[in-house]
């Protein structure tokens, strides 16, 4: 409900006539719990976009974009000849569903449609395990995999610095950071849900604060990431930088098999 209201407020602020922002809530107006839903709704949107010939980018809500990385994703896909781009955990060699970019084609549309059909028919399976297995990225196995899937090429994004997460940490290069995902660490001493909510709220408030806006406007072509990278401990953005700095690691850990 809160997500739908936020989307509708943003669409109204941008102006419905000129905005390319659309809000879809399959449960709007239905009776019962307004917060109920299914991960299948997200996959249904990707499925529809690909079948309309539109490249799809999906990501979790516990993420933060430090810049508009759409062109970067397009360039990576073009350079690698990739159909699918996804993030990983720094401590494991498996895809994470926190970020999914798929280039539209007949092959990817058919692959995704059949993946969605399989996921719908096997609700006891995990979406992430299914993607890893059906893309052939890991040696994981799933029950009743669809046969003769079209061949699509998946490529893992740089999770050292560029498309990073809290699971395994990141190496702390602010000049490269574009996206961060608050994935549950292997060991969480307190409520991770509460931690990431506070962290994300602080980042959004800082990014939208008038002090940050005026600094970015004065500096010209200057990203929020760069501003954080230059932030000193006693500056306005210093405490915000600390949030990500506490999640850095001195070196990449050995990747474990995907669970």
Image: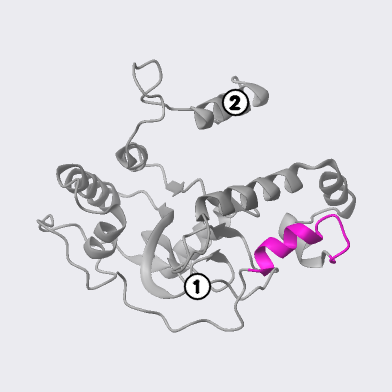
Q: Which quadrant does the C terminus fall into?
A: bottom left
Nearest the viewer among 237 and 135 is: 237
Report which quarter residue 155 is drawn in.
bottom left
Q: Position of residue 71 (x, y in %)?
A: 57, 55
Identity of the residue drawn at 36% across and 37% down? 45
Tell me the residue that label 1 is attached to: 168
Q: Position of residue 43 (x, y in %)?
A: 33, 42
**Element on which disc 1 rests:** loop
**Does residue 22 appear in this view?**
no
Asked if residue 154 is positioned above or below residue 204 in the image, the reply reads below
Q: Position of residue 26 (x, y in %)?
A: 36, 25
Report which quarter residue 233 is drawn in.
bottom right
Identity of the residue drawn at 68% across and 69% down? 245
Asked if residue 201 is positioned above or below residue 192 in the image, the reply reads above
Check whether the beta carbons of the residues at disc 1 and disc 2 lie within 8 A of each other: no
Q: Marks 1 and 2, Cα distance to the nearest angstrom?
A: 36 Å
Nearest the viewer among 131 and 35 is: 35
Asked if residue 235 is positioned above or below residue 123 in the image, the reply reads below
Tell me the residue that label 2 is attached to: 11
In the picture, measured across the screen, residue 108 lies left or right of residue 66, that is left
Callout 1: few (<14), some (14-19), or many (20+) C-alpha neighbours within 10 Å? many
Q: Is residue 113 magenta?
A: no
What stretch of residues is rendered in magenta?
232-246
Identity of the residue drawn at 68% across and 45% down? 204
Callout 2: few (<14), some (14-19), or many (20+) C-alpha neighbours within 10 Å? some
**Element on which disc 2 rests:** helix
Q: Position of residue 39 (x, y in %)?
A: 33, 42
């Amino acid at each position: 409900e809160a997500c739908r209201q936020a989307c509708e407020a943003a669409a109204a602020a941008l102006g419905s006539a000129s905005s390319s922002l659309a809000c879809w809530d399959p449960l709007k107006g239905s009776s019962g719990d307004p917060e109920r839903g299914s991960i299948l709704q997200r996959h249904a949107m990707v499925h529809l976009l690909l079948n309309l010939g539109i490249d799809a980018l999906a990501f979790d809500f516990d993420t933060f974009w430090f810049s508009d990385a759409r062109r970067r994703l397009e360039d990576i896909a073009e350079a690698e000849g990739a159909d699918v781009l996804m993030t990983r955990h720094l401590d494991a060699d498996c895809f994470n569903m926190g970020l999914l970019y798929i280039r539209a084609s007949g092959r990817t549309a058919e692959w995704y449609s059949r993946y969605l059909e399989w996921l719908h028919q096997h609700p006891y399976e995990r979406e992430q395990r299914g993607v890893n297995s059906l893309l052939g990225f890991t040696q994981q196995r799933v029950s009743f995999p669809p046969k003769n899937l079209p061949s699509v090429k998946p490529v893992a994004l740089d999770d050292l610095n560029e498309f990073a997460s809290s699971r395994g940490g990141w190496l702390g290069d602010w000049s490269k950071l574009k996206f961060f995902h608050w994935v549950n660490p292997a060991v969480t001493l307190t409520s991770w849900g509460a931690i990431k909510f506070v962290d994300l709220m602080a980042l959004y408030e800082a990014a939208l604060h008038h002090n940050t806006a005026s600094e970015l406007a004065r500096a010209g072509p200057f990203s929020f990431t760069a501003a954080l990278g230059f932030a000193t401990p006693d500056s306005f953005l210093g405490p915000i930088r600390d949030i990500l700095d506490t999640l850095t690691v001195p070196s990449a850990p050995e990747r474990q098999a995907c669970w």
